[in-house]
Amino acid sequence: DTGVSQNPRHKITKRGQNVTFRCDPISEHNRLYWYRQTLGQGPEFLTYFQNEAQLEKSRLLSDRFSAERPKGSFSTLEIQRTEQGDSAMYLCASSPTGLDEQFFGPGTRLTVL
Amino acid sequence: AQTVTQSQPEMSVQEAETVTLSCTYDTSESDYYLFWYKQPPSRQMILVIRQEAYKQQNATENRFSVNFQKAAKSFSLKISDSQLGDAAMYFCAYRTGMDSSYKLIFGSGTRLLVRP
């Protein structure tokens, strides 16, 4: 399967712990996006990379959130000092240059106890 | 700021019938793109159909078509000959036409139930 993959698929953590999620985009897709989706809502944009450069960040991305895409391939999203309000599905998507369509991964479901 | 509104939390359709899902949006831009994405239960979100704002012709993809009313800022999705596999959450999404931003702004979604 050459689609977008995300790991882990599920993560349960205690409040105050740090968590890191990984996203592997479709090969040769230079654009990578992170979204957060809470229950009953549509995805909300968090951040966007073009290759290794982080070009856009949402105000939702507080200082506890950091995202990287070190070599323009996979990306990581870290949440420090997790709070119960961080519980959500974290979606990653990728797209190639010149194409509007974003290809989504299965998501990582985070539960903060 | 742009917003997308889907006022139907849930819709139901009989198999083989036609259903229309509503979406309205608010923007001051003249150049933008609109999308419908489908999110089946426990599966990845996939693109159903897209529309460029500068195109007057409504987009069509097989059984899926849109009614794009730019002046009214309305973008509805019509699903013809509904199938059991169409059951999913459907999200309307907006993207600015500015080259510097590629983020999608989503509505809250409509859950489509298909009755056999």
Image: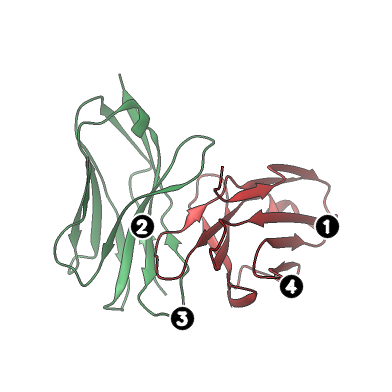
Q: Is residue A113 visible in the rendered structure shown here? A: no
The answer to whether residue A107 is left or right of residue B92 is right
Report how far apart the C-alphas of labels 4 and 2 lie in the structure. Answer: 29 Å
Which of discs 2 and 1 lies nearer the camera? The answer is 1
Residue that numbered label 4 is attached to: A63
Chain rendered red: A
What's the distance in space between the residues labelled 2 and 1, CA to CA?
34 Å
Callouts 3 and 2 close, C-beta under 8 Å: no
Question: Residue A100: image x %, image y %?
Answer: 39, 64
The residue wearing badge 3 is B100
Chain shown green: that is B
Front-most of A88 and A6?
Answer: A6
Q: Earlier in the sequence, mark 3 or mark 2?
A: 2
Q: Which residue is mark 1?
A: A18
Q: Chain of mark 2?
A: B
Residue B5 numbered tag: 2
Contact check, label 4 and label 3, Cβ < 8 Å: no
Q: Secondary structure at mark 1?
A: loop
Q: Amino acid at mark 2?
A: Thr
Q: Residues within 10 Å of mark 4 (few under 14, many from 20)?
A: few
Residue type, label 4: Asp
Question: Colour scheme used in the picture?
Answer: by chain
- Work out whether B25 lies above or below A15: below
* Amino acid at pointer 1: Asn
* Circle nearer the viewer, 4 or 3: 3
Report whether A2 appears left or right of A6: left
B73 on left or right of B97: left
